[in-house]
Amino acid sequence: MAMNTVVCKNCALDSETPGITISADTGLCQFCEHYTPLSKEKKEEFKAQMDALFASIKKQGEYDVIMALSGGVDSSYALYRLKEEYPHLRVLAVQFDNGFISSTAFENAQKFCELTNSTYFRLILDNNLLRDTFKKAARSKDAYPGFAKYRASDMCNTCMSIIKQKLVEMAIITKTPFIVFAFSPGQTEVPFVTLTRPFMTWIRKLFDAQLKTMGVMERDLYLMDQDTIAASPPDTEVMIVHPFLVWEYNKHQFKKDIIRLGWKEPDINDPNSSNCLLNAYAIKNHFDKYHIHSYAYDQSALVRQGIIKREEALKTLHTEFSDVAMKDVDRRLNLPEK
């Protein structure tokens, strides 16, 4: 960090990050200056809405919910909590094998599926094509719109977009009304998102254009099947639910709870991931390209909401990455020497 860098007095965003301004008068970034906490009434309203949604499911398919399960802390806890609060739900838990998931994360995901009586599915795509796509994401510049760069790295945006495309397609095929993602309250701001058929077509077209910008040729491998969308009834809807915008979010407590249930700590030297070996590399790649730490906005939002302390966020964002881990990912991606 440069000597004249100014860090927001409230969160972890700093003046070196493009697009961030720190007020000379208040010492606050623009997000902290205009932040309004969610009211207790609004939180209760969200909880009542989620209860109502999961209570009145029409049993039209084999599953009620498709859950994005990484095997990490948040998603493992979210699956357990979901089945604790709504034991009647028939859950299909999908773990995307992106070629960089730790072996412990696979074990954790399957263990929590057994624990919750959920159906486990490992989503596997062509590993060589995936690796080439991540390489192209790493080398790309500005494939994703401005604010997406603050939410996640180019590599993680690509991975998450693939997961979303595939889960929505699975939801249409299996007639599953809900998809659950265990995003933190710093990673997303809307608890419920309804995808209509035109919206699905739009997000498919958007991701297709982003992949094309990166130079990805085998784009259909990652996109929702167009015929599947077209063949679905005109009133087809899939709702995405982010339960951590409804439940209280406390990652440290989540970890204690799931460890008691048999969750195991993976051997990953990355404070931002408990499942993916690619994540730290993706963060560094993103920072080198844009001078944006892809977890700075997330961590700062959690500070703003009173979920974590500012010191914890700063420590997370300034943790040094392991050179050995960086070189291992670089070797596996087969990127040329810089």
Image (cartoon, grey):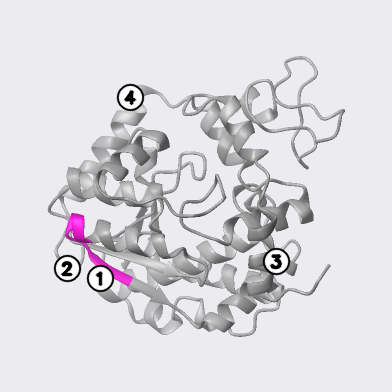
Query: Crowding at label 1, few (<14), some or many (≥20) Cα neighbours within 10 Å?
Result: many
Q: Is residue 67 among what the camera can see?
A: no
Amino acid bearing label 2: Gln
| 226 relative to 270 in the view: left or right | left
Picture quadrant where residue 271 is located? top right
Query: Crowding at label 2, few (<14), some or many (≥20) Cα neighbours within 10 Å?
Result: few
Magenta stretch: includes residue 118: yes
Element at label 2: loop
Q: Rounded to the nearest whole Å, what is the CA distance between mark 4 and mark 1?
A: 33 Å
Query: Crowding at label 3, few (<14), some or many (≥20) Cα neighbours within 10 Å?
Result: many
> Which mark sits nearer the N-terminus, 1 or 2?
2
> Which mark sits nearer the N-terminus, 3 or 4?
4
Q: Which residue is mark 3?
A: 138
Amino acid bearing label 3: Ala
> In the rendered image, which quarter contains the C terminus?
bottom right
> Which mark sits nearer the N-terminus, 1 or 3?
3
Q: Nearer the viewer, mark 3 or mark 4?
A: 3
> In the rendered image, which quarter contains the N terminus?
top right
Residue 130 sits above or below residue 154 on the image:
below
Element at label 3: helix
Query: Crowding at label 4, few (<14), some or many (≥20) Cα neighbours within 10 Å?
Result: few
Q: Which residue is mark 1?
A: 175
Residue 130 sits above or below residue 36 on the image:
below
Q: Which residue is mark 2?
A: 60
Q: What span is colored magenta in the figure?
A: 114-121
Element at label 4: helix
Q: Which residue is mark 4?
A: 41
> Which mark sits nearer the N-terminus, 4 or 2?
4
Q: Rounded to the nearest whole Å, what is the CA distance between mark 1 and mark 2?
A: 6 Å
Pinpoint residue 6: horizontal percent, then vertical percent: 79, 26
Pinpoint residue 206: horizontal percent, then vertical percent: 58, 68
Residue at the spot 42% in from the left edge and 65% down from the top edge: 103
